[in-house]
Image: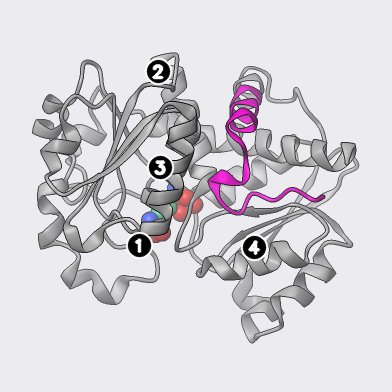
Amino acid sequence: MTRHFRRDDDLSPVEYLQVLDMAAELKADRFAYRPLEGPRAVAVIFDKHSTRTRVSFSVGIAELGGYPLVIDAQTSQLGRGEPIADTARVLDRQCAAIVWRTFAQQRLDDMAAASAVPVVNALTDDYHPCQMLADLQTVRERKGTLAGLTLTYAGDGANNMAHSYLLAGALVGMHVRVASPAGFAPAADVLARAGEIAARTGGSVAHVTDPYDGFAGADVLATDTWVSMGQESEAGDREAPFVPFALTASAVAAAGPDPVVLHCLPAYRGKEIAADVIDGPASAVWDEAENRLHAQKALLTWLLAQEATS
Ligand code: CP
Ligand code: NVA
């Protein structure tokens, strides 16, 4: 069976740590794995803007011995309405994997359902699982462990980052708190699924509406833009309710000793994160951005290894 990475919990807790271990190996030796030697092509398709995802997949696929085929969806037939399943059946005959950044999660799921090669979620409206591998690699580097740590994500609790922190944090046994205004709570089904996973891994998940209930004692503080791609028309309503949830110096002071500050980037200084926090000593955001490269190389290597053994 072809394995996909549509959302964080497509990997089991054991598999998730295997990928993080490989990411650490690949960081120490950039050319440790060459599963795409040939070169084999990987399609990397964008329905939305990107800097980090585009660069890290392009560089990573090349470093794995492969050829990155970066496609702007608007200039492909997908952008003119060619069925997703037909696109999958064309790509999977020529590419070793398909990486896609799109809008609705259903589109990504439809691509995976029709594809004979692994499909990787490079961000949808609902999840950003590749970012999460990089984030947890970064926390592990700084803290030496993941299980038992408290990670608080503050901001839009209903967006892709919030949902992926819940699932991925639960998979590695963290205590994940999402702090958001009441009207921007995580989807109930995601919160419930993360809770089920956490019950098995020794972690926990919670949604809080008082930001300091989130910040207090946290080992990791994370945030993200209040206005995700596709929500630009809601920007006016997405400011005032979020201001108390910003990562400011006082939020960092309320956290535990030596907290790690994460932001997937791009960041809006003075909005969801203060300049002195993102540019201050607790910030790990540049390591986090670099780790996209190592984590995604590990993921592709792991997924392709499952192909080889199935
Ligand atoms: N963090 C992230 O996914 O960045 P890009 O939108 O630049 O790819
Ligand atoms: N939540 C943000 C993440 C950007 C990497 C968005 O979807 O725009």
Query: If you read the primary sequence from the N terminus, does the residue marked by circle 3 or circle 2 appear first?
Result: 2
Q: Residue 45 got which mark?
A: 4
**Residue for point 21% across, 43% down:** 273
The x and y percentages for residue 155 are: 24, 50
Query: If you read the primary sequence from the N terminus, does the residue marked by circle 4 or circle 2 appear first?
Result: 4
Ligand 2 lies under 8 Å from the Cβ of mark 3: no
Vertical comparison of 25 with 120: above or below: above
Amino acid type at image mark 2: Arg
For label 4, the SS is strand
Mark 1 vs mark 4, CA separation in Å: 19 Å
Vertical comparison of 138 with 115: above or below: above
Residue that carries the numbered disc 2 in the rendered image:
142
Residue that carries the numbered disc 1 in the rendered image:
228
Nearer the observer, 190 or 286: 190
Q: Residue 195 got which mark?
A: 3
Amino acid type at image mark 4: Ile
**Residue for point 53% across, 36% down:** 133
Q: Is residue 27 visible?
A: yes
Range drawn in magenta: 1-22
**Residue for point 28% across, 77% down:** 233
For label 1, the SS is loop
Mark 4 vs mark 3, CA separation in Å: 32 Å
Mark 3 vs mark 2, CA separation in Å: 26 Å
Amino acid type at image mark 3: Gly
Q: Is residue 290 visible?
A: no
